[in-house]
Image (cartoon, rainbow, N blue to C red):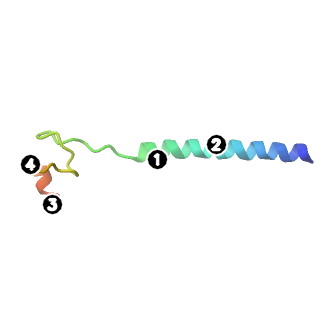
Amino acid sequence: MLKKFGYSLVVVGALMFGVGIVNTVLVGSAMAEEKKCDKCGHLPSKAEKDCKCECHKAKH
């Protein structure tokens, strides 16, 4: 009885570990990296105060 319980805990632990690994991979691949502006080098979502680039004016 105790031996079966131990095996089931091992199997459940392995499945939980596998789900965690797959989740990490999927979340990492789903996150998109934002490209920097070609003209000014800033991120379009975070404009600098002195930047007068067109890519920042469209967002605000």
Numbered disc in front, either 3 or 1: 3
Q: Position of residue 45 (x, y in %)?
A: 23, 52
- Asked if disc 4 and disc 3 are in contact, CB closer than 8 Å, the reply is no
Q: What is the distance, in whole Å, between disc 4 and disc 3 at their CAs?
A: 14 Å
* Relative to 28, 48 lies left or right: left
> Quadrant of the rendered structure where residue 40 is?
top left
Q: In the rendered image, which residue does mark 4 sit on?
A: 50
Q: Residue at x 9, y 51 (%)?
A: 54
Amino acid type at image mark 3:
His
Q: In the rendered image, which residue does mark 3 sit on?
A: 60
Q: Residue at x 54, y 47 (%)?
A: 23
- 52 w.r.t. 38: above or below: below
Q: In the rendered image, which residue does mark 1 sit on?
A: 27
Quadrant showing the C terminus? bottom left
Numbered disc in front, either 1 or 4: 4
Q: Residues within 10 Å of mark 4 (few under 14, many from 20)?
A: few
> Quadrant of the rendered structure where residue 35 is?
top left
